[in-house]
Amino acid sequence: MRSPLLLRAVIFTALFAVAVIIGYFIIRPSATLPIYHPSELDPRLVDKDVRNEKGEHHILDFRLIDQNGDSVSLATVKGKVVVADFFFTTCGSICPKMSTQLVRVQDKFKSDDRVMLLSHSVTPELDSVARLRDYGALYGVDHNRWRLLTGDRPQIYRLARQSYFACTTQGNGGPDDFVHTENFVLVDPQLRIRGFYDGTSAKDVDRLIGDMKTLLQESSRD
């Protein structure tokens, strides 16, 4: 017969092991990404018209034209993991860095048709379909994975401020308005915002790539 001391030691060890396991599952980082609502964001990012939006925030519908002259709308990307950004082809500062980082994202998911990158021109009056096509050729843009978008300027600026919350400036997309932001915005297949990233930072884009993989795993379980 085991001694009471030995029995207590065995029980203590077992209880300690159980506590460690429970503690691990309590404090380990969650694999679930947040779902962002306008009320949770920096107010400077959120257009005043949507700050008090009720329920889940979803990306607004849109209709723009890509570098191949094809129409792109919300229906094009619904059910996909989307990365959105805002750029212009004549930008000589942050945009080339952002496009270089998006090449990395494109290459990482080149075989996954559940992923779509959307780059919106903030100077659509200058960035014609032909100019976007040339820009895409410069960066090796794959039309199946990455759309460069042009079209109605007020619509694009509304998307930046009321849909993706990508910039801190205010405006209506008029001639004197201008959006210039390094933000990449991650959107899930249900059209909800799940993350914001510095598109000029390789380290932050590494984080984006990891979060995209998390969303793809999440959607495969649904």
Image (tube, rainbow, N blue to C red):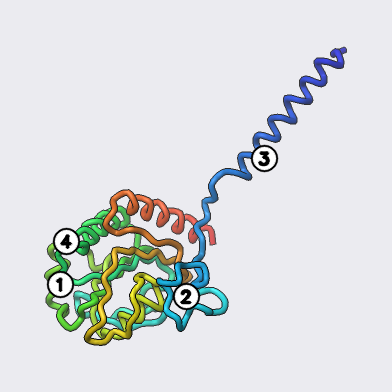
CA gap between label 1 and label 2 equals 29 Å
Q: Residue at x 60, y 44 (%)?
A: 27
CA gap between label 2 and label 4 equals 30 Å
Task: Name the residue that disc number 2 marks.
Answer: 58
Which quadrant of the figure has residue 211? bottom left
Front: mark 1 or 3: 3
CA gap between label 4 and label 3 equals 48 Å
Secondary structure under badge 2? loop
Q: Residue at x 43, y 74 (%)?
A: 46
**What is the x, y in percent for residue 190?**
48, 70
Q: In the rendering, which numbered label is found on residue 101?
A: none
**What is the x, y in percent for residue 195?**
43, 61
* Contact check, label 2 and label 4, Cβ < 8 Å: no
Neighbours of disc 4 within 10 Å: few (<14), some (14-19), many (20+): few
Sequence-wise, which precedes: disc 1 or disc 4?
1
Q: Residue at x 76, y 25 (%)?
A: 12
Task: Name the residue that disc number 3 marks.
Answer: 22
Task: Name the residue that disc number 1 marks.
Answer: 133
**What is the x, y in percent for residue 136?**
17, 67
